[in-house]
Image (tube, coloured by chain):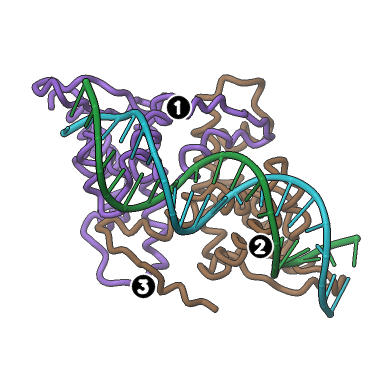
Chain colours: A purple, B brown, C green, D cyan
Amino acid sequence: MTTHAKNERRSDCPISVALDIIGDRWTLLIVRDLLFKDRDEFGAFLQSEERIATNVLADRLRKLEAHGIVSKVPHASDARKSQYRLTDRGLDLAPILVDLIVWAARYEKTAAPPKVLKRMLEDREAFIAETVHAAKKRATHE
Amino acid sequence: MTTHAKNERRSDCPISVALDIIGDRWTLLIVRDLLFKDRDEFGAFLQSEERIATNVLADRLRKLEAHGIVSKVPHASDARKSQYRLTDRGLDLAPILVDLIVWAARYEKTAAPPKVLKRMLEDREAFIAETVHAAKKRATHE
DNA sequence: CAGGATCCGTTTCGATACTG
DNA sequence: CAGTATCGAAACGGATCCTG
C-alpha cells in the first residue's frame, strides 16, 4: 500500500525532498538511468546491474512520481508498456548528478575512467545540455 | 579497518561510492551537519532534528571514515569527546550539497526560504568558499 | 557525562512466485 | 511485460546499558 503520508519535517536547510530522493540508493539510481542511459521502461530499470527488485522499483517510481520528478505516460506504440520521463524538475538534477559522478570518480583509483567521464570534466556545460536534450527527445518521440 | 574492498560493482558511471554516501539518508545528513551547521561531535549529530539513533549514527560515521570522507580525532580540550572532521574529499562535496539544497528549495513551495538559501543562490562561489573555510577552521582549532 | 554497544520490537528490503 | 503478493532476512528506532 505504501501510502507514505510524508512526515514532512521542517529544517532551516530545506533538504527534505533531497533526502527522500537523492538520499535513497534506488531513486538515485533510477534518475541516473533516466538521465544517462537509455532506460525509461520498467523492464529496462530492472536490467541495471545494481539489480533492483520489482517491488522496490515500483515503490520508488511511485515516490518519484509523487515528488514530481518523474511522470508516467502510456507507451506510444506498445499498449502494455509505460514510459517514464523526467519532468523539468527531474532534468534539473542533471548538473548535480554529473558533479556527483565526477566527485566519486576523482577518488576512485579504479581502472581507466570511461569516456563519458572525460567529457563531463572537460566539457561539462555542453555535456549537461546534450544530456538534457537527449532525455527530452527520447521523451517526446520514442 | 578500511577494508572497503566489499562488493565493488563496476559501472560505466562510477557512481558506487556516491551511492553509498549520498544515496543514504543518514550519511547525507551527517555531511550536511558537518558542512553547514556547527556540528562535529557525536552528541551534536544526535541533536539534529531528524533524530538519528545512536547505533545508526555510529555505523554511518564508521562508514564515512572508511570512505575517507570524515576523520575522527580526539578532542583538543576535552578528553572525553571526539571530533569528526571532513577530509578534503568530504569538503569537495560542498558545491554538490549547495546545489542539492538549492534544487530542493526551488520546488518547495513552503514558507519563506532562509537567508542561507538566498546567499547560496546569489553568491554561490563565495558562499561555498566561506563554508569550506569555516569547516577547515573549525577543524584546526576548536 | 560523552561515545558508543547491545538488546529487541517494528519496518523495510530483497528474492521469487504470481497475476492481468 | 508491468507490476502485486508473500515471506524470510536485514535494517531501523528506541531504550537501556556499559566504559573511560
Q: Secondary structure at mark 2?
A: helix
Q: Residue at x 27, y 59 (%)?
A: B11
Front one among B114 and A7: A7
Above or below, B13 against A132 in this view is below
* Badge 3: residue crowd in 10 Å (few <14, some 14–19, many ≥20): few
Q: Are marks 2 and 3 in contact (CB under 8 Å)?
A: no
Of the two numbered discs 3 and 1 in the rendering, the one whose residue sits closer to the viewer: 1
Task: Give the residue at mark 3.
Answer: A109
How far is the residue under mark 2 from the one under mark 1?
32 Å
The image shows residue A108 at horizontal and vertical percentages of 38, 68
Amino acid beneath label 1: Met
How far is the residue under mark 3 from the one under mark 1?
43 Å
The image shows residue C12 at horizontal and vertical percentages of 50, 42
Amino acid beneath label 2: Ala
Residue, far left: A77
Please count the marks in the image.
3
The image shows residue B40 at horizontal and vertical percentages of 72, 59
Above or below, A109 against B111 in this view is below
Q: Residue at x 41, y 51 (%)?
A: A100
Task: Give the residue at mark 2.
Answer: B58
Front one among B67 and A103: B67
Q: Are marks 2 and 3 on the same chain?
A: no
Front one among B32 and D17: D17
Quadrant in the picture for the N terminus of chain B: bottom right
